[in-house]
Amino acid sequence: MIPGTSGVEFKKLDEPLRKQLRKFANLIDREWPSAVRREAGTHIIFHSFVLAAETTYKTIIWICAELPDLEGKGRDPQFVLSVPPLARAILDQVFTVCFLSEDIEERSFWYFKAGWREIKERDDRERRRYSTDRGWEEALSSNLELLDKLGELAKITQDEQATPSRITKFPNPGRMHEKCVDSSLKDYLLFLNDWFYRELSQEAHLSATGLISRAFPQVLAHTGLIPDQWLRERLEQVRSRTVVTTVTLMIALLSEIQGILKFPSISQELSYLWTLLGAYWKVPEDLYKRRYQSLLTP
């Protein structure tokens, strides 16, 4: 899966990473540190992020695995071309936790306020179109229940309820650096944008560059312009790159959360994962030295 590793060697990374994901979910749920207030809903964000990332990670590894599926069939090698958008979802979470870390309580409120605004605007659109449709009664009622609960969590004011546009939209990952005060955090978000987010977004949105990366190898092989062997080698390269990128982003996500919550002994365990991964690929070592070595130092 990773250049220079066997399946056995990959398990040395995969098994402790899965263990950390389970451990983080339990720690966030049961041992939330008193130093970080829960009123802003940060615990909900982090718990949800860990569970969502775990599902995404397992999905990516299953798609990229060389082992047969439950029916005894091998994975279609071309499935790996659909994985980069999944990896980008994990990267989005890394960006968000980085951004939240600069002002954890205020930005957690902002995160939920912006979410409330989006749901309210969607509800308004649906009511304009479907308010007389009895088939939509249950959905519209559910909208109101969700808005009430989220509004309470986000402390939506009467003015914000009356005019949702008063709530500033939460920035997308590519714009978060513009809102940062700390120059080192801003530089790191720019680094992530240049070296991870740009390419994964291109492949997710199928811009011209993303289309070339994801679909042109198939087109060339289908039209007979390149031999099948070339396509197989290309797909293997994509598979290896995608897996190592995914593992890197997963460890980065847990490291960002640990940098805020500081659970006992976890920093040492994550540093070990960075060291182990860095033995196979240069980029994790760069990330670790740029941010996570200091973030994980007690």
Image: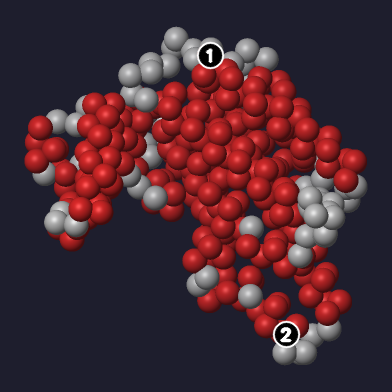
Quadrant of the rendered structure where residue 149 is? top left
Residue 266 location (% of width, % of height): 66, 20
**Number of numbered discs visible in the structure rendering:** 2
Judge left or right: residue 147 versus residue 11.
left
Can residue 184 be seen here?
Answer: no
Residue 246 location (% of width, % of height): 66, 47
Sort mark 1 into few (<14), some (14-19) or many (20+) by Cα contacts within 10 Å: few
Looking at this view, is 183 or 117 the one in front?
117
Q: What is the three-letter code of the residue carrying label 2? A: His
Residue lying at 9% horizontally and 41% vertically, measured from the top left = 162
**Which disc is residue 113 wearing?**
none
The span from disc 2 to disc 1 (Cα, nearest Å) is 53 Å
Q: What is the three-letter code of the residue carrying label 1? A: Arg
Residue 232 location (% of width, % of height): 82, 71
Residue lying at 67% horizontally and 50% vertically, measured from the top left = 60
- SS at mark 1? helix
Looking at this view, is 180 or 101 the one in front?
101
Compared with residue 144, is residue 126 higher up or lower down, i.e. above or below? below
Compared with residue 207, is residue 38 higher up or lower down, i.e. above or below? above
Residue lying at 57% horizontally and 18% vertically, measured from the top left = 27
State the residue position of label 1: 30
Quadrant of the rendered structure where residue 217 is? bottom right
- SS at mark 2? helix
State the residue position of label 2: 222
Looking at this view, is 10 or 168 the one in front?
10
Sort mark 2 into few (<14), some (14-19) or many (20+) by Cα contacts within 10 Å: few
Looking at this view, is 124 or 267 the one in front?
124
Closer to the chain start, of discs 2 and 1, is 1
Query: Which part of the image, by quadrant, shows the C terminus?
Result: top right
Judge left or right: residue 198 versus residue 151.
right
